[in-house]
Image (tube, rainbow, N blue to C red):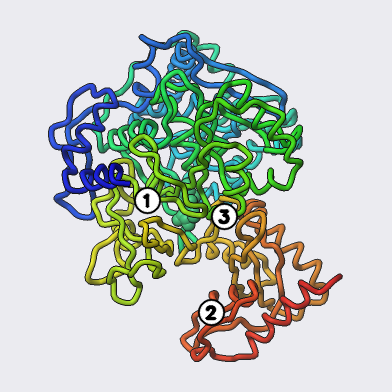
Amino acid sequence: MGNYRDFHRRSIEQRDDFWAEQAKLVDWHKPFGKVLDYSRPPFAKWFIGGETNLCHNAIDRHLAARAEQKALVYISTEVDQERSYTFRELHQEVQRVAAMMQSLGVKKGDRVIIYMPMIPEAAFAILACARIGAIHSVVFGGFAAASLAARIDDARPSLMITADGGSRMGKAVLYKSLVDESLRLAKNPPAKVLIYRRGLDPTMPVVAGRDVDWQALAARHAGAQVPCAWLESSEPSYILYTSGTTGQPKGVQRDVGGYAVALASSMKLIYRGEAGETMFTTSDIGWVVGHSYIIYGPLIAGMTTIMYEGVPIRPDAGIWWKIVQEHKASVMFSAPTAIRVLKKQDPAFLKKYDVSSLKHLFLAGEPLDEPTHVWISEALGIPVIDHYWQTETGWPILSAVPGIEKTPIKFGSPSFPVYGYELKLLRESDAAEAAPNEKALVAIVPPLPPGCMTTVWGDDERYVKTYYSTFSKKQVYSTFDWGIRDKDGYYFILGRTDDVINVAGHRLGTREIEEAVSMHPAIAECAVVGVADPLKGQMPLAFAVAKAAVDDRKKLEKEVMDTVDKQLGAIARPRAVHFVTLLPKTRSGKTLRRSIQALAEGRDPGDLTTIEDPAALEQIRNALKEESAPK
Ligand code: PRX
């Protein structure tokens, strides 16, 4: 890997020159002066003084060469619809939504929460925010009202945008009524809610004076022209909430210029997407992958992006490959769970369609097990690139970089550190660098490269405390992932060091789930751990102590699960809720989550010298036996 290794080294050793070169991939209204301002570590500001706009780079700058090329193709197997927009049409739609938002009082720097299903209007709203310099915060549609309310209170939006409903497996999911509930719970609800009606909720309630009908407002702004607001490179572009160790989600804040450059560069060097080609990313706009590689990345690259509303196995397990064939997608991006789901279906579906347009399939979001990696690579006959990153970084940390060198793929490994990242594997005990094949913490030597989070929204101190305080003698960014590097320099990610779990690629905090379980009035305390699941990667499992003796365990378990659904959303629902009379704790009162997790996964519970009462662990063992016993 001589070539890529040199490229990576140059990105670290000649950082400013390297990024100044990459910055040529985007349009600057005003050129930047300094490449990096790192005068206040660990806060990094990229492309100082430069002015640009994400929407301009995603749409306007392509109008001269590709106005009539499709920019966005929306395919819904839920409502059986396909709509597509050329760059010219997208330009018009986005300007119209920008004008609509302005008419509702949204100004530069205001926050707009977008809680929408996978429909083109969601993309218009995101790009319209970027156009006028409003800060969008998209919340995944699977989150429940209480989670949404917590985000509203943190971001204090001046506007919320939603739809009457979404659809999952053919069943309507009511978005607007959930938004109503969240606004009742929020301490600082916005004055206006803009609602796109899809006809999925005919009885949708409307709050006079607050709720605004999208279609009626759009009719008044047809043909609107709204110029791009030129933003200084490090002004905020968006906030995206993500889970951590505490129950309170963190608002990951990103900039404008650094993000534009990182995406443009990754589209070219990692994803190998060329202008005029098509990218199909199967994520959701509510996640970071949706932000970077459904919306901004492919459009910045002048590609057609596919927005798919539906599941991978409806109407049958060939649907994604049919989409690839019909739209001649050259780049595809998905998640390991989806591939494991497809692996369980009839493999004939993969052969039924011509997918020869695909150059690569990229997978991320959770560990990719070797058998799945092998299976999909053989089935497609193209390189399947496992790559690793986080909401915080916004673009890959570890990946093969085929735009520089076609390094061989090792199954189960996301290859090498991406250029711009100075990665270290550090021993937890003394921050020393680990030996080859020694499990250690994956850390990044700051400054983080362009595109990464710039701070926690409204809380600089939390940013530093959360991410840079693992070691007292070294200020490094902690990914909170374990990893190893083999003798050839390939990395392997071995799971989180903290209480974050990954359910089907959805990142959740066990603390958040514990708080949700404890919302049930009968529960005194609980512990939630993530346990290995063959399909979803991990599943939450809850152990709860009830306030009084439990007569009907099944009934209470169901009620607790419903409480979690209501507080967080069904994605966080535990696989089971076991009732115990005490939890295993250390003598200082810390719950021994790792021991519980080990028992649940059939492993040794580890060092138990600090346990307060060993009987607690016995209860966990018995509960697990009961769960696995035939019913
Ligand atoms: O634990 C790592 C896991 O997912 C976490 C980040 O999740 P999220 O913020 O939702 O961002 C996903 C962006 C793709 C990481 O800390 N993770 C992500 N990719 C991989 C992975 N674990 C193993 N292999 C990967 N390729």
| Residue at 43% over, 34% down | 271
| Residue at 65% over, 90% down | 615
Residue 20, percent from left and from top: 19, 34
SS at circle 2: loop
Q: Nearer the viewer, mark 1 or mark 2?
A: 1
Q: Indicate the amino acid at tag 1.
A: Phe
SS at circle 3: helix
Q: CA distance from mark 1 to mark 3?
A: 17 Å
| Residue at 57% over, 33% down | 162
Q: CA distance from mark 3 to mark 2?
A: 30 Å
Q: Nearer the viewer, mark 3 or mark 2?
A: 3
Q: Which residue, given by chain and number where applicable, does mark 2 sit on?
A: 592
Of the residues under marks 3 and 2, which one precedes in the sequence?
A: 3
Determine whether label 3 and label 2 are within 8 Å by CB.
no
Q: Residues within 10 Å of mark 2 (few under 14, many from 20)?
A: some
Residue 559, percent from left and from top: 74, 62
Position of the C terminus, as image quadrant, is bottom right
